[in-house]
Amino acid sequence: QETLSTDLRFLSVAAWLLEQVAPELRRLSVVDVVADIQRTISEECNFVQERKNLQEFRDFVQRFGIASAYAPKVFPEASTTRVLTMERLYGVPLTDLDSIRVYTSDPEGTLIQAMNTWFASVMFCDSFHADVHAGNLLVLRDGRLGFIDFGIVGRISPKVRTAVSELPDALATEDYKAAARSLLNIGATSRDVNLDAFAADLRTVFRQIQSLDLSDLGVVGDGTINEAAINSITFDLVRVGETHGIRFPREFALLLKQALYFDRYTRILAPTLDVMRDERLRKLSSRDGTRFE
């Protein structure tokens, strides 16, 4: 732990010096990127906090009566700051279509349940799972969804939560000006933003993403997902915001990355599913949080 902390402090100082020597790099937010790396690694090594994150999700699932989702039980008597002992779950990754068909006759329905559960947690849980790659999202032997590894979670403010809830409708209708307005509410800016120009750039980026195939999106032959490809798309969208003077919080990048994961899963499990218009997704939760469909 001490060695890791020393290495992370060195990275922080190095990033600051780099921005002093080459001021043009400040636009890339090198110091902020390193700070995010520090925060992420620290969170993943904090098993006490991970236990709390996991319990928050379990409480959320129970409160909303989501029978299709499950997170492992923690054994506190066998856990410490350096050890987290959990119930073992048996299942297959969400990218393994052939194996998923062994446990469910409706892979598309299972995917929809996964997306509904995750998005509802964004809206109504104190925190949301911020690392839903295929190794952390399983189809269990009984057909339920297993969410594991809560080392990285995100927490958003009510203002951002409202903007996030409005964004899918804007994208579904290709109303990029409304999407730009939602993203502006998510981020922070110190100058006036040309909403029309921002909307035009968003239209270009989202249409490019829609035109990509699985190989472009980082899905390789065995169904695993290339993290570099996901990160590249995330950075592209963040850069569009920065071009217009908008600085997005860390949680936006986390949300966007998870959305890209689910987009990959959709292309594998349900290639004909219209995520933006399918009623099973568009009515996934009530705004006041009193019920879950």
Image (cartoon, helix red, strand yellow):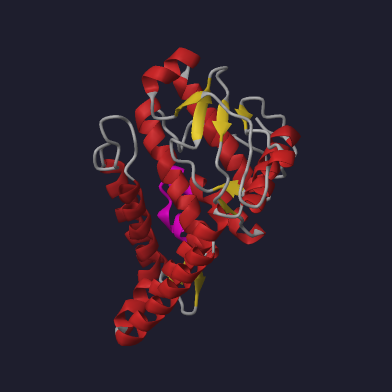
Q: Could you say which is closer to the camera, residue 181 or residue 33? A: 33
> Is 237 on the left or on the right of 76, as rendered?
left
The C terminus is located in which quarter? top right
Q: Is residue 107 left or right of residue 118?
A: left
Image position of 147 with respect to 4: above or below: above
Q: Which residues are magenta?
A: 170-180
Q: Is residue 179 above or below residue 16?
A: above
Vertical relation: 131 (above or below) 37: above
Give residue 70's position: percent from left, percent from top.
Answer: 63, 30
Residue sitting at x 49%, y 53%? 254
Q: Position of residue 54 (x, y in %)?
A: 65, 43
Q: Let me know if residue 193 is in the magenta part.
A: no
**Image quadrant assignment for residue 286:** top right
Image quarter (top left, top right, bottom left or bottom right) of the N terminus: bottom right
Rendered image quadrant of residue 271: top left
* Closer to the camera in the image, 110 or 31: 31
Q: Nearer the viewer, residue 41 or 282?
A: 41
Q: Is residue 175 magenta?
A: yes
x, y percent for residue 216: 24, 42
Q: Residue at x 40, y 33 (%)?
A: 265
By secondary structure, the bulk of the magenta-drawn segment is best described as helix
In this view of the protein, can residue 178 be seen by the observer? no
Relative to 88, is 248 on the left or the right? left
Q: Is residue 85 above or below residue 19?
A: above
Where does residue 15 sit, x and y in percent of width and height? 38, 76
Q: Identify the residue at horizontal 68%, vertical 37% (top origin).
A: 74
